[in-house]
Amino acid sequence: MTTGKPDLSNLQGVAFDFDGTLAETHINFAKMRRCIIEHLQRWDVWEDGMDDGRYVLDIIDMGADALGDAPDRVAEFRAEADRILEQIEIETCVTAEPFPGVPEALDDLRSHGLKVAIVTRNCRAGVQSVLSRHHLHYDVLLTRDDVHLVKPDPFHLAEAVRLMGVDPRRTVMIGDHISDIQGADGLGVITIGVLTQKTTTEQFQEVGADAVLPDVPTVVKAIIEARGCASV
């Protein structure tokens, strides 16, 4: 299933989202949102409408902005918010598993000389709790703890491309959410949505995904087959 036929024959780098793309983490995002709203309420910076379709990290930013010019209070507010997010993420990440075929797919990319990056809004501790139990090859790991702007801001992926040392036009970003596609905006990176979670083909198409495939092993198979065809 595809929405197009991007050229995958001359790739140098492959970037992946983590939660819902490489691993089934089952993070309770509803609980996370509820706890962060309660956090803002405790700090008396919650206003009706802040939860109007925004990402949780954006709600935290709005709460920090509402504290005004008070660096110490902002730092304390953000530190407490980070602890809330990390606790909820680790609750499920400590038992999370990679999707079937993912470890082998990442090894196949390495054996074909491709650089691999993981670009995630998850915390580093959460991701590492999975990586400590399962071998998943990567060259670059950028969690939200490692960058000052996270996807869908393109800075997150751009930094991963820079650290891989690859041409963005010869890089593909693969993810299960529209933010993974939006995070490549303006970079020249190929984007592929995977149908491993709730995002539909139509939703991926609406945000401009270059292709949509069922899962990571299917994408990696397409990449390797494209490289093989190009070398014939």
Image (tube, rainbow, N blue to C red):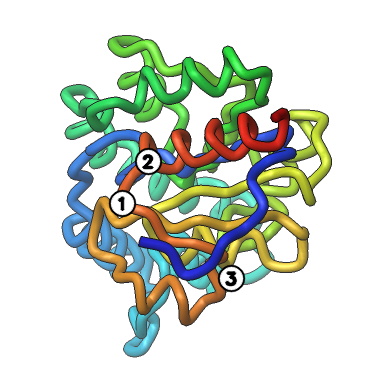
Res. 91 image quadrant? top left
Query: What amino acid does circle 1 point to?
Result: Pro
Quadrant of residue 95 within the rendered picture: top left
Count residues near mark 2 (Cα–Cα under 10 Å), then give few for <14, some for 14-19, many for 20+: some
Which residue bears the numbered disc 1?
A: 214
At x 35%, y 29%, the residue is 126
Give how far apart the Cα atoms at labels 2 and 3 are: 43 Å
As drawn, which residue projects farthest toward the front?
A: 232
| Real-space CA distance between mark 2 and mark 1, rounded to the nearest whole angstrom | 7 Å
Judged from this view, the residue extending furthest toward the bottom is 49
Viewer-side residue, 175 vs 93: 175
Question: To which residue does mark 3 refer?
Answer: 65
Q: Amino acid at mark 2?
A: Thr
Which of discs 3 and 1 lies nearer the camera? The answer is 1
Marks 2 and 3: which is nearer the front?
2
- Residue 184 on image: x %, y %: 65, 60
Residues tagged 2 and 3 counted as in contact (Cβ below 8 A): no
Residue at 62%, 47% in the rendered image: 172
The residue at which mark 2 appears reads as: 218
Viewport quadrant of the C terminus: top right
The spot of residue 183 in percent (x, y) is 60, 60
SS for dot 2: helix
